[in-house]
Structures are given as C-alpha cells and as structure tokens.
Image (cartoon, grey):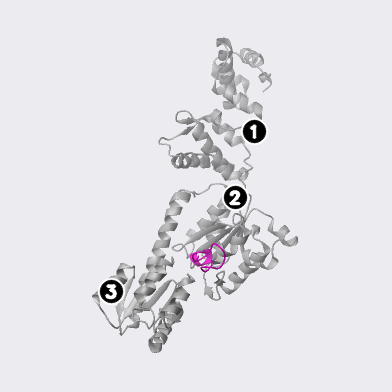
Amino acid sequence: MSGLRVLIVDDEPAIRQILVSQVRRAGYEVESAEDGASALKQLDAGDVDVCICDLRLPDIDGVEIMRRARQAGVNSTFLMMTAYASVETAIEAMRLGAFDYLTKPLRGSDVLHRLSQIENMIGLEAENRRLKALVDEQQGEYFRSGSGPMVEVERLAAKVAPTAGTVLITGASGTGKSLIARRIHEQSPQRERAFLSVNCGAIAENLIESEFFGHVKGAFTGADKAKKGLFCEAHEGTLLLDEVCELPLPLQVKLLHVLEEKEVRAVGSERTRAVDVRILSATNRNVEQMVADGQFREDLYYRLNVLRITMPPLKDRVEDLPQIIRFFLGRESSRLGLKHTFELDPLAEEVLLAHDWPGNLRELQNMIARALVMADGDSVTIRDLPRLVGVREREKEEAVSRSEPSGNLRDRVRDFEVTQIRQALAASGGDRQVAAGELGIGLSTLYRKLEESEGGVGRV
C-alpha cells in the first residue's frame, strides 16, 4: 500500500465517487469533500499529502483553496481539475504551486499516473534530505572487521537482513549498535527506502508520541503545523529504535499496537494511517531484568526480540584496533577540516593498544579527535593523548621518557642505550647472549648497563 493520503474535492457526487473508488483500488488512502469549506477543514489538519481539487466549487474556487492552504502553512501537493479549461486559471494555479492541471472528463489512468509522479517526487525529496544527513553524519562509518566476534555479528546481520523479522541489537554503549543496524538495512529489501533512527531516551516524554506517530495542526499548544511522525516518514523503509528500553510504559503499549496492527493514529486525529515499517531496536540495558522488574513490557519484548544480535565490547576486538585507530585518524581529521594526513607515533599506538576502552568505539573516536586537535605537525604522539584509564602511569611515563630525551648528555646516552638493549632483548625473545651479540657488546657489559638504569631494569 502507498503511503500517500489523498483528498478528492468535487461538488459532483458521481465524479467524487468514481475518483475515490479508482484511487482507493490503486492502494492510496482516500478521503473526499464536496465543497471548499469542508476541504479546507481537512487540509488544515495537515495530514493530506495530495489534494485533487476541482477549480469550480459552489462556495470557494480551487485556486482560493490552494492560496488559503499555503497561507496556513499546509504543504499538500495540489492536482487541479476542471471542465472549464482556460489558460488564465491554469497559469494562476501553477503560479501558486499546483503540481499539474487536468481537464474533465478525466481518465482514471491519467489521475493515477499523476499520483505516481507525485509519490515519486515526494519520495525523492525525502531521500535527498536523508542522503544529505547521511553524508554529513555517517559517511564512511562502516568497515569490515577481521576479529572473530565481529565476523559472527556480520554473519548474523547477513542472515536476518533479508527477512521481515524485528531485530533486537544489544551491547554496551559505544559498541556500534547503530552501525550494524544500518548494515542490516543496506542488505535488506528496504535498502532503497528510508533508514531513520530515533534515540528513545533523548526525547521529552510529552513529545514522544508526536515524534513517533505525528500530530495534526492544533493538537496541542505549539502544534502550529502538522507533523507526519517517524513511522510515516519511514513507510516501506526501516526505523531504528535506539535505546528502546528508555520508552515509558504508556508508549510501550502504543508501540506494541503499531507493530501488531501496522497502523498509527496521529495525536489529535480521529483517523488511522497504514504503515509498513521494518523495525530494528537497540539497547545497552539488561532487557530481561527490566522485564522481570516490570519496567519493560514482556509482550513488547517478545515482539522486538524475534532475532537478536549482541555487539562485542572493543576490548574483545584487539585484532581490529590498529585498523580502527587508523580509520578514525582519517575520518576525524576530515570532519575537523584538517588538510593533511596524520601518522600515529609507535609509542602512542602502543598506549592506545594497551587501553581497555570501557567507552568502546565512541571513547576511541573522541580520543582520536582530541589528539588530532592537540597534535603539532602531522604526527599524533603520546603527549597528545589524555590520561588513559587502564594504562599504568609508570608505563606512560616510561614511554614519554623514551620519546622525549631529557637531562644532561650522560643521562640521554644512558637512556638511548637502555632503549636499544630493550629492543634487542625483545627481538631475541629475551635471550641476553643473542642480544649482546647483536649489539656488539659483551654479556657482562649488557648486564652492567641494565643494572645502572633506573628502576632495576636489569631484572627484566
């Protein structure tokens, strides 16, 4: 079924009935009005997508209806019709923004063809807005992972994507739940349609119903124009309910009704509207515990949890870390408007790889962005990184001392020698005899220099 709602305005009952029947058979939702006053009342609610309106009516002509609708902020698309074709009225109607102009007697095929064109135009405009937002916010967000846990996630995503089932994506904050949701959409039959995401915890409770289901003009204080709502905007596409466990219980009931009946009722409206939306949901909460505690409806939980994907924390994706770090270096430098390419100092990379990342991908992304701002030149060093939770301060201090020599010449030479000995020991797997041979010094000299270094390094 199409997502368009059509209003047919004509004072001749026979024409009205024929058009209503033809348009409804084509899959559109249809209402009708016999005069201008009735038409304006329905248009003013703001939930009419297309108005097929006769130019000659007993009380208000079609051009005046369109003019008043525009003045009231109604953005319905108008398709005018008349038995009195005239260049003047056609020009006036088109000047005010009518989509087209048809003369009576009408052919049903012509009307349906125009409706199809209007539907495509509305869809393209919405898609352009979505693509712009996607370019601004999500460009380059996804890359393939090589770690075992993420290979399994991608396998599950590929399995569930072609189905119509709802998917519940769980995992800690910052693990990439919204990214895998988009991945599912891109592999689904809905990939050419809208992908919309809403953070259920970021909307004021008194506005959630309007955000989800829309409202008509005048439904509440401040509703000076109609709003379609996310379910209508995502018709025939995908809607991600991010942080779904933050929904208040009354909204959970209404969401369950929408999922089961596939229809929504805008706030302040007496009419329902059919919707066909693929639902994905995500949460970082323990849903089962919330159900047991009565904080989340059990019936809604089972409705959302048809298929389930659990995102692993970043600490379980160590194989991916070098790739992810470089990915964020490139993307964040572009977002920040920095013109050159940044390299990552080996010591800085060592510290990043040692961190346990409690904030997951989001923490890493923010840390890289900060480091790029702080960096001097075209290399990110350890000095550009903030104090890291999970990395021993001594390790960081040692890394700093190795990257930036300090003290007198004797101290600097000693530090350099110790660094070279450490590297030789690492390369030899800890074999001191082999390391001394590689460095061209005696074994006793190697031990002495290690013992002379600070912190008893000779015990390494």
Q: Is residue 171 visible?
A: yes
For the residues labelled 3 and 2, the Cα–Cα distance comes to 63 Å
Task: Name the residue beneath numbered marker 2.
Answer: 149
Q: What secondary structure is found at the residue carrying circle 1?
A: loop
For the residues labelled 1 and 2, the Cα–Cα distance comes to 24 Å
Mark 3 residue type:
Ala
Q: What secondary structure is found at the residue carrying circle 2?
A: helix
Mark 2 residue type:
Pro
Q: How many marks?
A: 3
Q: Give 232 or 101, whichever is nearer the viewer.
A: 101
Quadrant of the rendering where the C terminus is positioned: top right
Task: Name the residue beneath numbered marker 3.
Answer: 90
Q: Give 94 or 369, whichever is nearer the viewer.
A: 94
N-term-proximal mark, 3 vs 2:
3
Using the image, determine if residue 261 lies above or below residue 350. below
N-term-proximal mark, 1 vs 2:
2
Query: Which of the two marks, 3 or 2, is nearer to us in this view?
Result: 3
Q: Residues within 10 Å of mark 2 (few under 14, many from 20)?
A: some
Task: Name the residue beneath numbered marker 1.
Answer: 391
